[in-house]
Image (cartoon, helix red, strand yellow):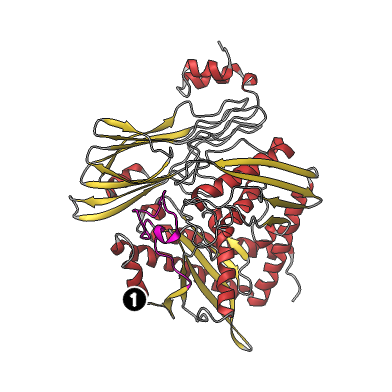
Amino acid sequence: MSEPDALTLAVIQAGLQQVCNEMDIAFSRSAFSPVIAEADDRSDGIYGAEDGALIAQGELGLPVFVGTMAHSAAHLVRLIREGRVAKPEAGDIYIVNDPYLGGTHLMDVRFARPVFVEGPGGSSLFCWLQNTGHWPDIGGMVPGGFSAHATEVEQEGLRLPPVKLFKRGELDTEILAIIQSNIRVAEQRIGDIKAQAAALLVGEQRLREMLDRYGAATLNAAIVGIRARAAERMRAEIRRIPDGVYRSEAFVDSDGVVNQPLRIALAITKRGDRLTFDLSGSSPPCQGPMNSVWATTCSAIYLGVKHVFPYVPINAGTFEPLEVIRPEGTFLDARYPRPVSGCAAEVSQRIAEAVFLALAQAIPDELWAAPAGTSGNFALGGFDPARNAGYVMYQITGGGYGGNAGEDGLTNGCSTIGISKTAPVEVMEQYYPVLFRRFAIHEGSGGAGRRRGGFGVHYEVELLRGEAKASFVMDHGRFGPPGVLGGLPGAPNVVRLHRDGGTTVPEHLSKDQGLRLKAGDRVEVMTPGGGGYGDPGTRERALVARDVARGYYTRDQAERLFGPFA
């Protein structure tokens, strides 16, 4: 069939995206866990029947999930063809969280639902609908799954290969029982499971409305055309970059086990209308959980480029002009049984940071200094005597964005890898036995520059009842987010524990696990500010004075960073 006209293509493209948007909204509105219902730590997409290639994604989901789900769908298709996974039927939903099969960390659980269409030869598979949701707990050594000291993936939680959790629309209670027997607060997960499945059902209903309107042949032809146009649009953007090799490096504080930095070494080669990304000079595999699986590493490159060129429509064609050389033998190509709980939430952001720093050399007017680059993963698990129930609280936090050529960085922006935001503290206080003593701007954290970085967040949370264990997997505690073109780095991440009248800082600065808290103990976190853009001495004096008047910097800080001002 010939390609539909341009207007029809545009309408179909918007329609496919809207299908994903509705899945995102349905998932969040029906989920039980605040991390999904309030923080939107989830994503939905449509993927090709034959190769798992990305067809469409929602505007409201985490980009890193969308990228990894394409890898996951491709693995699912391969395993079905090899006869290692049961063939799909209408109403089936597969569940999988195996990081080495196109995943991130174990807490990010993926559901996949096949969509069939009827034709002259009978029923055929049209596409896959997929979503990922961050479950607050998946078992493992510590509540929340963020084990800072894990040395093998089994210590991080329950690992699920692709299996049918729903068979012809019916929940398999035996598989559900296995899952619930291996995770904490198991009785709460059924709400999230049904929400995740319901979102896919909403997606199928909306997609069938499009199939009824246009027919499968027209939709397939449109998908091919949309993909080709996205590829050409990306090539056009790449052609604006001067040919050459652009190098950068970024550092992970430590792996949580060995207290030494991990280096990400990136070389971007631009030739004509293609970009090649080489990470082969990066550190070798690490003992702790800061290894990154290939799907996450590749997705981090893609989302970094998409940040730079936000107006390119996103589907598999968007990434055709990008070649990512697999960094074998490094911590960015984790193989079983390497632990990976920090890969999506932290390492992926260091990879994207390296992309930004490299391309800032090529097109500085279009780039920015490094953002906070940490999700601020804080998990608290314990027993609430007032409710006679266990709980797992998972907290993510924003930070400062880097300054750019035109403006200062955003304060308390979401993480580089997605749109997830901190759940309202009022909601967290209703769900869990905690009180937020402080939730404010991390004053002085913005990196100095002609355009300063945005500011991080400063919060302090007190345990009110019972006992609990706290765990952290964060980053940028050793090194603040770098500035560019003479700008200074933003302030690093800070974690403090206030217990028994004293204050301690974790050995690995912002990574630790299983720290015992009792009522009255407090956890204090100050997230990083963004890096500065340009020479701080060239910042307008009136802007410096304004920042001091607003309390963003003390006068002494401002004069030290920017020089004297009136």
* Residue 23, percent from left and from top: 49, 63
Magenta-drawn stretch, dominant element (helix, strand or loop): loop
- Residue at the image point whose x is 64% and y is 45% from the top: 265
Asked if residue 494 lies left or right of residue 188, the reply is right
Badge 1: residue crowd in 10 Å (few <14, some 14–19, many ≥20): few
- Magenta-highlighted residues: 136-162
Q: Which residue is mark 1?
A: 173
The question of residue 159 being in magenta is answered with yes
Q: Which quadrant does the N terminus fall into?
A: bottom right
* Residue 349, percent from left and from top: 55, 46
Q: Nearer the viewer, residue 521 or 136?
A: 521
Q: Nearer the viewer, residue 356 or 245?
A: 245
The question of residue 169 being in magenta is answered with no
Residue 395 in sight: yes
Asked if residue 391 lies left or right of residue 344, the reply is left
* Residue 132, percent from left and from top: 48, 61
SS class, disc 1? helix
Asked if residue 542 lies left or right of residue 555, the reply is right
